[in-house]
């Protein structure tokens, strides 16, 4: 193996950003994203039918389509 300078930075499989960290599900090895594309939100806000919840649902559907190749 080469030196650290020769190593390529890992890329997030979700957004493509260079990262040192991935977020994974506790229920499997699925990578959910990195600090660049995953954020924490309040669960109560998420449950509401406000604009933020609709936007997040839409982004999830786009992500799911990308993962499934549609």
Image (cartoon, helix red, strand yellow):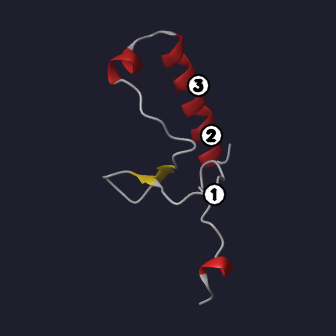
**In this rendering, is residue 55 above or below 59?**
above
Q: Is mark 2 on a helix, strand or loop?
A: helix
Q: Name the residue under label 3.
A: 58
Q: N-terminal of the two: label 1 or label 2?
A: 1
Q: Is mark 3 on a helix, strand or loop?
A: helix
The picture quadrant where one finds residue 46 is top left
Residue 70 percent location from the top left of the image: 68, 42
Residue 31 percent location from the top left of the image: 47, 54
Q: Mark 1 points at which residue?
A: 18
Q: Considering depth in this image, is 52 or 67 the residue closer to the camera? A: 52
Residue at image point 60% right, 79% down: 4
Q: Is mark 1 on a helix, strand or loop?
A: loop
Label 3 and label 2: CA atoms lie apart by 11 Å
Residue 22 percent location from the top left of the image: 48, 55
Label 1 and label 2: CA atoms lie apart by 23 Å
Residue 65's disc number? 2
């Amino acid at each position: 193996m080469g030196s650290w300078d020769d190593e390529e930075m890992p890329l997030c499989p979700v957004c493509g950003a260079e990262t040192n960290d991935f977020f994974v599900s506790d229920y499997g090895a699925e990578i959910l994203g990195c600090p660049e594309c995953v954020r924490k939100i309040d669960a109560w806000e998420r449950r509401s039918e406000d604009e933020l919840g609709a936007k997040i649902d839409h982004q999830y559907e786009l992500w799911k389509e990308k993962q499934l190749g549609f």
